[in-house]
Amino acid sequence: MHETLNPKLNRTSPCRNDLDRGISQEIMQEIVKKPHIFVALVQNALTVAQSLRDNYFADTAKLVYQLRPKIVIGNNYNSEDDIFKIEEVDKNKSWEDYRGEEIAFIDGGIGSVEFLSQVPMLLRVGTYKVKTGERTLSERENFGFYPVIFGDLMGGSKERKDYPDIVRIIAELLAVLNTLQRYPNLDILVLHGPLVYLMGQYAGHVPFTEDDIDIFLKNYGLGNDLKREFKEEANRIYPHMTEQWRSTGWIGRLEGSFEPICFIRFLLRKILYAANDENRPRKTLICGVTERGTLSEFTRRVVFQKLFDQDLNVFNKIFNRNDINSAEAAVNRLGYNDPLVLSMLLKPGQYSEPFDIHKYENFDSAVVADVRLNYKIFRHEGPFAFPKITGIYLQVSENTFPIRIEVFGDLAKEQIEQVAQRIYLYSTLLPGYAFPIGLDIIDKFAKVPNWLTNAYEKLIKYHIMSQLYQGQITDEELRKIIIQALYTTQRDWLFRPSVR
């Protein structure tokens, strides 16, 4: 890519300027031929400052022109002008190279019945395990799901809008643990979405009770050893969160309960250990895959920051400004994010260099029932840090934005190449969508569809109306009906892949 520019040409000469304009025009024509990029730029142009709008499209092409010669393909950086490197998957590899591998995909879906509560009533986490190259359907693929009814849970701050999210995150992590136990020969496990969310936003929930955890463990077939291990760890952590962790009159009392953030950290570390246990027949690659991401960390911390390190006025020159003096300002004022910028720099089969994703910087303190809890202890530099997360962006198709793949940071060096190769292969089976086909299947399987929620809403209403008049309705009977409705999944089998 360094050969794009002729080093003999002076950048200030008329010939150099003509060449710059010509190449910028070519880049603009490239963008016009890719509707997803063009539409995203048009949307950005409507939100940036008025002074940026008239030339936003052409100036973006100039920026891309500045960046492309500074990208290194493979190996190490060649010069001080290089900004970041990209790797390429081996396109010669096919399914035959991975025959016999076992892959599991996991996703969670939430359903609600509005007349009962504003809080979604049920969650089901779906798993889809497939063995590549196996032609016998019963041995090739297995579906499973785990239902949880929100009304059965006592803990968590149900008045918060993110209450369903915190329940879903815990449920999905328990599904990962369960899947690792059920399939000891699993080669790779793929979560739909981030491997870890931006956890600070979920701080401050009322703890879950031991009965709540029993409900989870019962559905996931996990034993009481998990509770015991967590309690031992929690007794070390809780005193660092608040001196009042044993207060008997406090609604958020920590002793003997399961504080959500602390429990999620515990589950992540259990997964990390379980997947790489030396006694396990095969180590399992764990990753999360996100489409339609909006992060701008790679653009801000890697691409733009290194541009500024080379020239503090680079953006002011391109965009004819005098106030874009930092990478943060460039991202904020210009509206760029990682998928948009990298979609103009990567080609199909290429992926960005790995970068640490700062998931825990927003951990601070939060008030629970008038008691302030310290969540800073979970940051990277804290005494009870969450596992580090490393990400890459993989471009699968010319007509889609790159997808973000996340792995555990401690294992990134040895796993990134293997994970990228497999995710690319899975995604090429959906060329128009460019997303791992197993996640597309499990997304449909785990989702609680409208026809299902409508059906059991009518069933519940009928049951309530008939039994109320007779005074025979009980909470237990109502729960049984909902569970029965959750297991009505015959249509899910329409989503299984056909045998080839």
Image (spheres, rainbow, N blue to C red):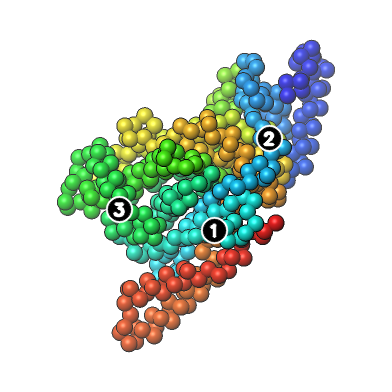
Residue 408 versus residue 397: which sits nearer the camera?
408
Q: Residue at x 62, y 65 (%)?
A: 494
Residue 165 visible within the image: no
Q: Which residue is mark 1?
A: 142
Q: Nearer the viewer, residue 118 or 439?
A: 439
Residue tagged 3:
224
Assess disc 2: are there few (<14), some (14-19) or many (≥20) residues with their C-alpha within 10 Å of its C-alpha.
Answer: some
Q: Identify residue for label 2.
A: 90
Tag 1: amino acid? Asn
* Callout 3 amino acid: Asn
- Residue 343 appears in which quarter of the rendering? top right
Q: Secondary structure at mark 1?
A: strand
Q: Position of residue 26 (x, y in %)?
A: 79, 32
Displayed quadrant of residue 318: top right
- Is 299 left or right of 32, judged from the image as shown? left
Q: Callout 3 environment at 10 Å: few (<14), some (14 to 19), or many (20+)?
A: few
State the image coordinates of residue 183 (x, y, percent, origin top left).
48, 50
- Quick one: SS at disc 3? loop
